[in-house]
């Protein structure tokens, strides 16, 4: 695999949503090697013409680009929002051993 084959995906969930369930499901299904669920934060955003503020959790998903399409489908199935955040950030560098682990953790068996 090339370095461009590794990505980080960001999404947010309501603070009262079971983000651990989403994380566990994505790792169990090999759609992600690792998912970090951050502590509650305040999100301020524009929605339907108004400015809103809600407690949320940032979720960071480490995966490979070949798992992205299925990951996006699964996030849409599990996500409570009408328009879930799904931002894909390319990995520009990383340790060879970590990237090998990431790849091996997302390979279908």
Image (cartoon, grey):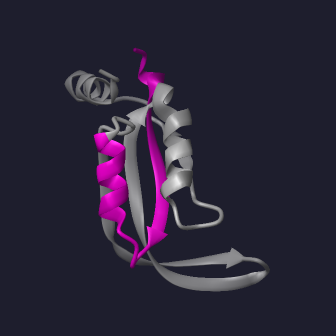
90 in relation to 107, above or below: below
Q: Nearer the viewer, residue 10 or 31?
A: 31
| Residue stretch in magenta | 1-28
Q: Quadrant of residue 98?
A: top left
Left or right of 92 in this view: 109: left
| Residue 3 image position (x, y, % from top left) | 42, 22
| Residue 71 image position (x, y, % from top left) | 49, 40
Residue 13 belongs to the span the image colors magenta:
yes
Q: Residue at x 69, y 76 (%)?
A: 46
| Residue 10 image position (x, y, % from top left) | 47, 53
94 in relation to 85, above or below: above
Q: Residue at x 29, y 26 (%)?
A: 99
Q: Nearer the viewer, residue 7 or 35?
A: 35
Q: Residue at x 56, y 85 (%)?
A: 53
| Residue 54 image position (x, y, % from top left) | 52, 83
Residue 72 belongs to the span the image colors magenta:
no
Residue lying furthest left: 97
107 in relation to 43, above or below: above
Q: Nearer the viewer, residue 108 or 85?
A: 108
Quarter of the image that includes the C terminus: top left
Left or right of 60 in this view: 99: left
Q: Quadrant of residue 85?
A: bottom right
24 in relation to 101, above or below: below
Q: Residue at x 59, y 60 (%)?
A: 84
Is residue 83 in view?
yes
């Amino acid at each position: 695999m090339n370095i461009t084959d590794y990505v980080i995906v960001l999404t947010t969930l309501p603070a009262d949503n079971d983000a651990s369930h989403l994380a566990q499901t994505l790792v169990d299904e090999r759609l992600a090697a690792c998912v970090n669920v951050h502590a509650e934060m305040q999100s301020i955003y524009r929605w339907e013409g108004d400015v809103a503020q809600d407690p949320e959790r940032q979720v960071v998903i480490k995966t490979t680009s070949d798992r992205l399409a299925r990951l996006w489908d699964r996030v849409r199935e599990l996500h409570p929002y009408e328009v879930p955040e799904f931002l894909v950030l390319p990995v520009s560098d990383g340790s060879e051993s970590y990237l090998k682990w990431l790849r091996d953790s997302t390979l279908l068996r």
